[in-house]
Amino acid sequence: MSGANVPPVTSVAALYGIAHRIEADAAERYAMLADQMETHNNLDLARMFRDLARAERLHADKIRELAGAIGVGDDGGPIGPWKADSPESVDLYAARYDMSPHEALRMALAAEERALAFYTDLAASKVDRTVRDLATSFAAEEREHVALCHRLLERYPPASAARPGDPDAPGDR
Amino acid sequence: MNAAEPLKCRPSDYKSEVKPIWCPGCGDYHVLMALTRAMAALGLPPERIAVVSGIGCSSRIPAYTNCYGFHGVHGRSLAVATGLKIARPDITVICASGDGDGYSIGGNHFLHACRRNVDLAYIVMDNHIYGMTKGQPSPTTEPDFDTALAPGGTGLRPFNPLVVALASGANFVARAYSGNPNETAELIVDAIKHPGFSFVEILSPCVTYRPDQRSWKDRVHPAPVTPTDDPARAARRLMTDDGFNLGVLYRGHRAPYTPPTAAAMVAPESLEEEFEV
């Protein structure tokens, strides 16, 4: 999703900006999904996405706090630095009105794995040591989020649909 | 476009309180995201923008922005947008449509809007199906796409909107993919800034009636050529286009239509005199 569109990160300030943008975009995306699920009366999932949005906003705030005086200003402006999506944004195309918590968590897991790959690749690239160290710490954090998704997936086993047997499914032909 | 100093805006400044009712997974969510990002990048105040639409899933988009909006008659969004821009050239007019509304029911308006070259941006969210009315084939549906409403497919050759736009005189022709919201936003900015009639076709999957379109993300690719201002070269490219080339494909220099000045216009009173019996 983001691999071919990784913006150049040449300074700690740029990395703080990008990292903040990644979390803010992820929060926006989860909030969109929560709204969608509310509209389509899948309220359990709406709550789950709302919680995930809140968690991503907390991460964005934490990065702003960490950045301190450096700030997070260089985050790509209104359009953002990626052509497609920022790495941690869930894939909206994978959403369905009747999706289950398990499917939602799989979406979240995929997003966390993309964020982990982004920071891991950045840390392994030819960048300044300070950028590498910061990318490594962000990667460690994303690794924890990946592990958390795996733990949550154990609590929510696969199910074919949250509301099986819809007699008027919109895609039926 | 106004020459005033751009505002520092966020995309959320252009979103209304109304929550979209599109199906989860619909590409139009990305288009809304791209549109509000484009508006923020342009830094125009919401009250200086009008979003005009027709009928269909895509045409709900004006309600989801807090700009001026007009949710018009099926296929007639361009007629309204053209009139608005002529009456209020100071307003940035964005016209939104879908492939059914824009290419079939509004097909004639599309041709003449390209020909007139009024300074507005036309974005068409193309999902190759009538989604709102449960999946009838549209002008861009593949001939063999099998539905209960067209068993075995229509057998009809799909409409090529980019070729038609170019041949009819559009001054800017581009294709975007909604799954690349930032690239789409940049193309919308480019289209709005370019003088004259700017046409952006946005491939926007309908995951409900066309779940196969989830594969579009693997099919789209950047156009392997730079934009051209030569219509003949653009025509050759578009005629051999695979339907998935993204980017600006034609950028013309034709002067936009400008309405006659007030001094050159005939006063209604003088017409009344002429027809007096």
Image (spheres, helix red, strand yellow):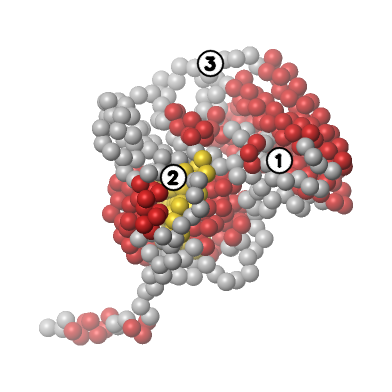
Q: Mark 1 points at which residue?
A: A22
x, y (%) of residue A53?
A: 68, 36
- Cα distance in 3D space between marks 3 and 1: 31 Å
* Residue at image coords 38%, 70%: B257
Q: Is residue B189 left or right of residue B256?
A: right
* Image quadrant in which you'd find residue A103: top right
Nearest the eye: B65 or A42 = B65
Q: Name the residue under label 2.
A: B125
Q: Tell me the kind of residue under disc 3.
A: Ser
x, y (%) of residue A81?
A: 66, 47
Nearest the eye: A2 or B233 = B233
- Cα distance in 3D space between marks 3 and 2: 31 Å
Q: Residues within 10 Å of mark 1 (few under 14, many from 20)?
A: many
Nearest the eye: A51 or B182 = B182
Give the number of the mark in front: 3 or 1.
1
Query: Which chain is indicated by disc 2?
Result: B
Q: Residues within 10 Å of mark 3 (few under 14, many from 20)?
A: few
Helix, strand or loop at mark 2: strand
Query: Which chain is indicated by disc 3?
Result: A
Quadrant assignment for the C terminus of chain B:
bottom left
Relative height, residue A140 to residue B97 (above, below) = above
* Image quadrant in which you'd find residue B229: bottom left
Q: Name the residue under label 3.
A: A160
Q: How crowded is mark 2: few (under 14 residues within 10 Å), some or many (20 or more)?
A: many
* Residue at image coords 52%, 24%: A98
Q: Farthest left residue?
A: B277
Q: Are marks 3 and 2 in contact (CB under 8 Å)?
A: no
Same chain? Circles 1 and 2? no
* Residue at image coords 49%, 17%: A164
Q: Tell me the kind of residue under disc 2.
A: Met
